[in-house]
Image (tube, rainbow, N blue to C red):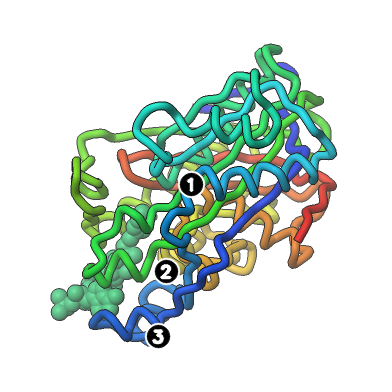
Amino acid sequence: MRKTMGRGAVLAGLGVHLPPGVVTNDMLAEALDTSDEWIRTRTGIRQRHIADPGVGTGDLAVEAGRRALASAGLSTVDAVLLATTTPDQSCPATAPQVADRLGLRGCPAYDVSAACSGFLYLLTTGAALISSGLFETVLLIGADTFSTTLDPTDRTTRALIGDGAGAVVLRAGREGEDGALLGFDLGSDGSQVDLLVVPPRGHFQMRGKQVFTNAVIRMTESVERVLSGLGWSVESVNHLVPHQANARILAAVADQLGLDPARTITNIGDVGNTVAASIPLALAHGVREERLRPGDRVVLTGFGAGLTWGAIALTWPGISITA
Ligand code: UT7
């Protein structure tokens, strides 16, 4: 599936926020039967940020949203969408409270739930709202406090997961300008829900090996569909920015695509798997490292519970972010 948009949806701002509390691998190893060596070699993760008790997804989302608005030089937008699997309450959605706290009371605001693919589902929805002519600007926030779903005694999931938030502003523009979102692919397979699930009143459960295999296949195929829809060669892609699940998964996706692994942008070592926040956190890392430059061809991809997956191609805009 590839959708071309009539007028362009253009990336105009980016902001991220991590809760200050850091849990290193050594700290995990004090409480669980694990080690820094095991976690680093099997996942590439050195540490993760974990929100303090009482700090919710909405709190992280507000900070990231504020920074994305500042990055875009905007104080108002036409809609606020939040991708999260850990909303502050099961009803209502968290987005209206986030919008209110950002001084955006009155604008349409709702949540999108697609787990680790959430940011890609969110970007696709936001781009469609703009290209349809319905809105001129949207604030899109991916935020999760997924650590709250974990079994405290489960060394595997606790090694992987961190909390965080990342946000972008999209504005109406032209498909030919830097920052335009150009190609989209989304998919799902609900028959495999058991691979990654938080059962009612239970903890997050994961079949790690099957998730690993599926993640590599689904992300690779999704990227290939987007590239073929646009007529872009793998060699012409400057940066691959995948959902940060496991450094070995990211390496395997680059390998399957035939892409130089040095073109993958990730900071999984510092943040772990932050679910819906994962891709914007990697984008912010790419901006800080001055790797993402205006006009660069960028492909985002992700995979997660559902199962869900997706990929989006864009050119990078000239934007800056606050610390
Ligand atoms: O939204 C979440 C998305 N989830 C993912 O993307 C996870 C995808 N899967 C993975 O990243 C990997 O499968 C894992 C990191 C979860 C596991 O890595 P693996 O290389 O597939 O290890 P494994 O499942 O083959 O486990 C090897 C051993 C097992 O012990 P036994 O059965 O061989 O005695 C595990 O119990 O490693 C053990 N193990 C650990 N040992 C130390 C699992 N977690 C840990 C740990 N520390 N944290």
Q: Residue at x 70, y 43 (%)?
A: 66
Tag 1 and tag 3, C-beta contact below 8 Å:
no
| Structural crowding at the residue carrying mark 2, measured as other residues with C-alpha within 10 Å and reported as few (<14), some (14–19) or many (≥20) | some
Q: Nearer the viewer, mark 1 or mark 2?
A: 1
Instruction: Work out which residue is located at the far front of the displayed protein and give it.
Output: 54
Check disc 3 and give the amino acid type: Asp
Between the residue at mark 1 and the residue at mark 2, the CA separation in whole angstroms equals: 28 Å
Q: Quadrant of ligand 1?
A: bottom left
Quarter holding the C terminus is bottom right
The location of residue 65, given as percent across then percent down, is: 66, 42
| Structural crowding at the residue carrying mark 3, measured as other residues with C-alpha within 10 Å and reported as few (<14), some (14–19) or many (≥20) | some
The location of residue 290, given as percent across then percent down, is: 79, 64
The location of residue 261, given as percent across then percent down, is: 57, 67
The residue at which mark 3 appears reads as 26
Check disc 2 and give the amino acid type: Arg
The residue at which mark 2 appears reads as 248
Q: Which residue is drawn at 51% across and 26% down?
A: 110
- Ligand 1 within 8 Å, label 2 CB: yes
Q: Residue 57 carries which label?
A: 1
The disc, 2 or 3, on the residue closer to the chain's N-terminal end is 3
Front in this rendered view, residue 156 or 220 = 156
Give the SS element for disc 2.
helix
Check disc 1 and give the amino acid type: Thr
Question: Residue 28, located in which quarter of the rendered image?
Answer: bottom left
Q: Nearer the viewer, mark 2 or mark 3?
A: 3
| Structural crowding at the residue carrying mark 1, measured as other residues with C-alpha within 10 Å and reported as few (<14), some (14–19) or many (≥20) | many
Between the residue at mark 1 and the residue at mark 3, the CA separation in whole angstroms equals: 26 Å
Question: Residue 159, located in which quarter of the rendered image?
Answer: bottom left
- Placement of 26 over or under 311, stated as above or below: below
